[in-house]
Image (tube, coloured by chain):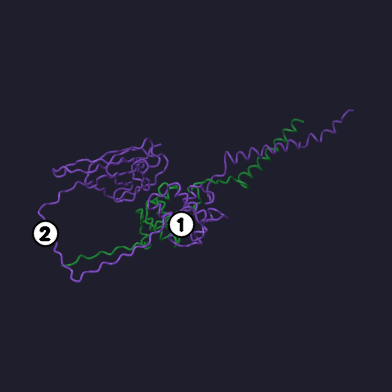
Amino acid sequence: MIMNPDDRQPAERGLSWWALLLGVAFGIAVALVYTWEIDPVIERNTAPWQLSAADREDYVIAVALSYTANQDLALAFDRLRALRPDQDVWSLVADVACNRIKTGQVVTNSDIRVIRALEGLYRPQGASGCADGQYPTPAPVTLSAPVPSATPSPTLPPPLTKTPTPPVPTDIPQTGEIIPTRTPPSGGYVLSRLESFCNPAAEGMIEVRVYDRLGQGVPGVQVSVTWSGNERDSFFTGLKPEREAGYADFRMTEGRTYTVMVPGLTGDPRSVEAVPCEVTVDGERVTALTSYRINFTQRSN
Amino acid sequence: MTKRYIGSLLVGVLVGIAIGVYIGWEQFPVEYTNSSIAALAPRYQEEYTVMVAEGYQVDRDVNGALTRLQPLGKANVFDYIQDLTERYISQSNVPAISPMVALAEAVGRRTPIMEVYRTTPVPTPVPFPTQ
């Protein structure tokens, strides 16, 4: 049986449906790997429900604090629903409060206020959790006004003494406002200066200054101080602009060793010790607690 | 025969890529569920900031407020507070102005435009008693 060549032609000229389907499947697979794994949609315009557990907790706390201020329950509900659509939002708040207590995140007065704010939001809505009543709001204290005495006895001002007060050495304050500049957070910081000084007027102080790579003070940098292993405090630069834009300070307790850190610190953090020191003031030896100047400078890339 | 298969395969691959890109970027894009506050849409970031500012109005804990704003990842959080406050004033976003002004003032970023919105009364000077 001999096949006529004209019979084969239409099939050879047209598409092979098997190959076409195979190609489509392969193309879709390649494209999905590319769009989902290699070059996915850039993460922006994220909604609150997409937050991680830790950041969701921060968001809930902010909602609770806001509710404490404005007492707008509908607004708080809407904000929480953005975090957890179609679910019980009040139990979410109770869970956050419980989790903070369980994980030992209630250390400072600020932390206690947070727990109270959370509880003040979820308990009236009927939710409950392990944080219930752990930090009750203290009853308001009524102070009785002192009764003025009928016949006030005039007090004479004390006579001036002839002994002049010895001048106490003080640091020369910085004059002039330093306008902070925008500083990119990348690059990290290096410890550029660590020195101790002895000043009875400012004893036991850790004076932290944070500079960018141009030498300008950087406000809003969180400085963490740890001591005694697990004790910790943090504060921010720039809250004393009369000193410097990138200035912050912390008072030490005698006998403790403190470790000072800023975010992105390159190299090991340095520790300072609150030990006594002596300084001569007007020919007289004065004992004070050692203070420290610690500067961090943004690293050049 | 081979040419026919290869041609069909290439056409199929092109069609498949087009379909896959449409699915992957438009129809079912990647949805992140472990995001940080820094990735929030601007309107949610700003709402979060106002909530923190309202909290500051209650507890007056500026360190606590700044700690809560750290996750936003702003290069200069003081500039951010000032800019947002001034923008709310210019937009007459009345509910947000008062807490934001209080927070801006707490971080030393009170500007003349904020002056009339301050809630903290300015202490009047007490005259010295005359003899």
Q: Is residue B14 visible?
A: yes
Measuring from the top left, give residue B55's x and y in whole percent.
42, 57
**In the rendered image, the vertical position of residue B116 relative to residue B7, given as above or below:** below
Colour chain A appears in? purple
Q: Which one is in front, A217 or B64?
A: B64
Q: Which one is in front, A267 or A73?
A: A73
Residue A119: mark in rendering: 1
Q: Amino acid at mark 1?
A: Glu
Q: Amino acid at mark 2?
A: Pro
Question: Going 32% across and 38% down the picture, which residue do you hit?
Answer: A271
Q: Which chain does the residue under circle 2 lie in?
A: A
Measuring from the top left, give residue B130's x and y in whole percent.
17, 67
Q: Is residue B50 visible?
A: no
Question: Going 34% across and 49% down the picture, which residue do you hit?
Answer: A238
- Quadrant of residue B111 within the rendered picture: bottom left
Q: Which chain does the residue under circle 1 lie in?
A: A
Measuring from the top left, give residue A195's x and y in whole percent.
27, 38
